[in-house]
Amino acid sequence: MNIQEYISTGILEAYILDDLSQTENVEVEKLANEYPEIRDEIARIEETLQIIAEKTKESIPEALKAQILDSTIGPVGLQGDVEKNLGKTSILTQVEPVTSPTKWRYLVAASISLATLASIAAVVFYINWKEVEQERDDLIAQNQRLADNIQQVDRDLKHLSNDYNIINKKNFQKIALEGLEISPESLAFIYWNRSTQKVYLNVNSLPIPDRDLQYQLWGIIDGKPVDAGIFEVNLSGLQRMKDIAGASAFAVTLEPKGGSKSPTMDQMYIIGNV
Amino acid sequence: MSRPNHQKYSEQELIAQLIAQDKLALEYLYDHFSQALYGIILRIVGSENIAQEVLQDVILKVWNNIGSYDSKKGRLFTWLLNLARNQAIDKLRSKEIQRQIKTDRLGNTVYILDQAKSEYPIKEDSIGIKELLERLVPEQRIVVELVYFQGYTQSEISKEFDIPLGTVKTRLRYALIALRKILN
């Protein structure tokens, strides 16, 4: 495999930013094991990210440090307190005067044991509670992410079914516009309704143009090109173009942003006869 | 970067001490990395108060989950960076701040970053974010802003801005290469 090409896809950056699927992660790790170039590149990207983060750091209020560190190691601190208390209780039981009635000694010992058990239980519960709280937060966030994904899928599906409803009608004719010499791989489809004159465009593949250029669709009517609107390549799905009547062909040219009055013939990318 | 005088841990030692739940190691980690992480978080959540909450969550996660860090997969900072980024994103979503808000912000990102900056004076050796990003070409800049400073995943950018995923990936890559050159 061509390692440089693989690296230049940007997959390693996505890997480092934890932005890949599990399968892709495994693939990257396997290749990193095999190829030192990939390992080196990963190290370089990590270093860059760290440098950027350090150069764009933000200062934190001084007081926050103690607050954060204390609350982070809090449970440990509590445990420490319990140990201290345990120490005290054993001293207490020893110091308890022998002169006390035996009954009292048992009662005191029992209550101290109870208190000790209770504080240990409290610590255990506190730690468990913290963990559960964390898990709960994680689940809520996960849930939110899933909900977002479903929304996205839902939108995509609506989009698709709209498109499908538009073209799945009797009068629509599908015309393939195929790539010319300038870009043989390019492909788009026109859905044209002769009677209502509606024109929809579905771009399958066209090179992304420079920022100051835009694609323009033309209907060829009686041998003359008629403007059918400019469009962006990025849009997925169908795009409604200008209505066209009686076309014998459709073609797309690359024009200065905003479109032209007549097509630049040597910049014709795709064409298709009706 | 201000280097505290007790600079005594190598990365491996630091990790080992954190696993051993050594408080001093945690303090060292805080002293060395919290400002960089805080910068990342603040730029994603856009609010000082929320960013501080998130930083606290991140430090707690480091303390509790350091055992799950795998040094074979990358350096410690990358792990921290992703923890911070993910925690900040989760916070944004759990606060039900709609994506719309983020999208609205998009046009003014640099403006907002500037605002954030004026509230937190940056030390002399840090470079202005605006200045840094201005040196990228626009299509790279927008991807870096979204991924690195606002917490979008690359596939989200691809969907929301109708840019093919492959293009997003390569733009981020070339942006990082350009930034590497600028920062070196």
Image: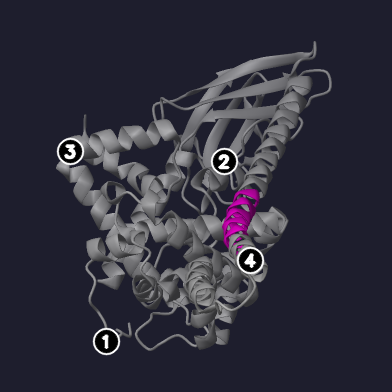
Quote the CA–CA distance across marks 3 and 4. Answer: 61 Å
Q: Quick one: A174 or B147, which is closer to the camera?
A: B147
Chain letter of disc 2? A
Residue A121 part of the magenta segment = yes
- According to the picture, the residue beneath numbered tag 3 turns out to be A35
Kindly check if marks 3 and 4 are in contact, taking CB atoms under 8 A apart as contact: no
Chain letter of disc 1? B
How crowded pointer 4 is (Cα within 10 Å; few <14, some 14-19, many 20+) is rated as: some
Q: Position of residue B111 (x, y in %)?
A: 59, 75
Q: Residue at position x 78%, y 23% from top?
A: A166
Q: Nearer the viewer's eye, disc 4 or disc 2?
A: 4
In the displayed structure image, the side of residue B144 where residue B90 appears, left or right = right
- According to the picture, the residue beneath numbered tag 2 turns out to be A234
Question: In the image, what residue type sits under mark 4?
Answer: Ala
- According to the picture, the residue beneath numbered tag 1 turns out to be B5
Q: Nearer the viewer's eye, disc 3 or disc 4?
A: 4
- According to the picture, the residue beneath numbered tag 4 turns out to be A115
Visible in this render: residue B140? no
Q: Earlier in the sequence, mark 2 or mark 3?
A: 3
Quote the CA–CA distance across marks 1 and 2. Answer: 54 Å
Q: Quadrant of residue B90?
A: bottom right
Magenta residues span A119-136
Q: Quick one: A94 or A214, which is closer to the camera?
A: A94
Residue A209 part of the magenta segment = no
